[in-house]
Image: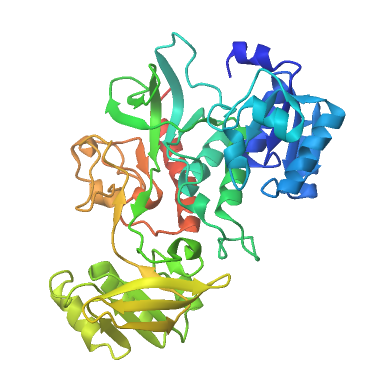
Amino acid sequence: MSNNLGQKLAGKIAVITGGSSGIGLATAKRFVEEGAHVVISGRREKELKEAAAFIKTNVTTVVGDVSRLEDLDRLYAVVKEKHGHIDVLFANAGAGTIAPLALATEAHFDQTFDVNVKGLFFTVQKALLLRPLADEGESEILCDLAIVGAGPAGLSAAVNAASEGLQTVVLESFAPGGQAGSSSLIENFFGFPTGISGGELTSRAQLQAFRFGAKFSTPVQALSLAFSEGDHAAVLQIEGCNAKLRAKCVIIATGADYNRIDADGCASFEGRGVYYAATTIERQFCRESTVIVAGGGNSAGQAAMFLSESTEKVLLVIRGADLSKSMSSYLSLRVKAKKNIEILCHTEIRKMTGDRHLETVELENIETHERRTVRTPAIFSMIGAKPHADWLPPEIERDNKGFVKTGAAVADAPAWKGAKRPPGPLETSRPGIFAVGDVRSGSVKRAAAAVGEGGMAVEGVHQALVAYP
């Protein structure tokens, strides 16, 4: 945050919704440091008390869910009674009624809430607490570690790196949390027996990394990666920043976009019945049930064979006439021979329904238009993914699907010839450059696995940094 903005915030009243955790709490802390008094709202009183203890001074808390208009009214009533006006509104998250309010005019607040909103007003993007990466006129930024991507893998790396004293910069092109951040409930993450939302999990991780000193810049995109001589040999060009980010090591955690099934209700069941990987964890959920695998490639065939070992039945849904064009012949023969795998050709998934978890799926034969409803706890989507790796230079080797290769797969890369050590398991074809999470070739596409890889990569960073003074 610039000194100019700090001067503007001094003595101001700032209302921050969702201020008990993640970006909201970090924003509140920074605003107080700049001299503002903050009023933070949140749904849980215990978390608000912890947040107030973290901020320490110049903070008022209000319990409430601002997606409900009555709670929003109560929040502004408290502000009006105690302070008489609002100088800054930071509408964190943008859920429910907050999204339009974040873009409202000052007159709107005056009329709707009878609260005088003075001078300053920030939308979510403008109010991000994060200091600019570079001051005006600065041509380059130096750091020990640059992490590109702030999903579970990138955030885990940030927490571990910053807590171990590494100068850490995190770049995220959309919003911290990645795909996991949009999950309404992650039920199989270690330590949360009743589950936790992806947004809450990743916002906690971001705050944790922030407290250890990691520097975040979002939304900002890494446009290119190049290499030069010297200790800070990795050079990142960043969208909207004239200065270059020079790092001793880089962790690539940009993830992948998984092709979504075009069916009603699909988004509601991601992580609660719609999965993009078939592992022993998911197989346990589906024991002795009927499950659906969507896709006709090798990954779909392998998933169907794997799941057939413990489920009552596997329905392999494909749009084409057979498997011969998209699946290896040896695998298609095995799939066809498996008694509890039924191949549904010319079929698409139309609708998914359920309460908190997936319960039923409607299928349609696209030739006859006949529909059938199947009771199932799980659909495994194996219809492809596109890794976010197009911005990487040719020196970073990728597999035939575009995922970044690491470890033994890059041991013969030109940059490793003559090296005194082999590449680490998460190290790419360029020493000191690592890849973790969904963007990495061969990774397990699950949040817990991504968190583990993020921590492991930091150990590799320490080993790489031994070469630097």
Q: Is residue 76 left or right of residue 212?
A: right
Instruction: Specify whether residue 103 is in view.
Output: yes
Q: Is residue 152 left or right of residue 242?
A: right
- Percent across and percent down for residue 88 are 68, 25
Q: Is residue 275 left or right of residue 105?
A: left
Residue furthest front in the image: 111
- Percent across and percent down for residue 123 are 57, 30
Q: Quadrant of the N terminus?
A: top right
Q: In the figure, 369 relative to 459: above or below?
A: below
Name the residue located 22 percent from the left edge and 88 percent from the top edge. Answer: 337
Instruction: Specify whether residue 466 is in view.
Output: no
- Along the viewing direction, whichever of 380 and 389 lies nearer the viewer: 380
Q: How many marks?
A: 0
Q: In the figure, 379 relative to 375: above or below?
A: above
- Percent across and percent down for residue 155 are 51, 43
Name the residue located 41 percent from the left edge and 71 percent from the top edge. Answer: 351
**Quarter assignment of residue 108:** top right
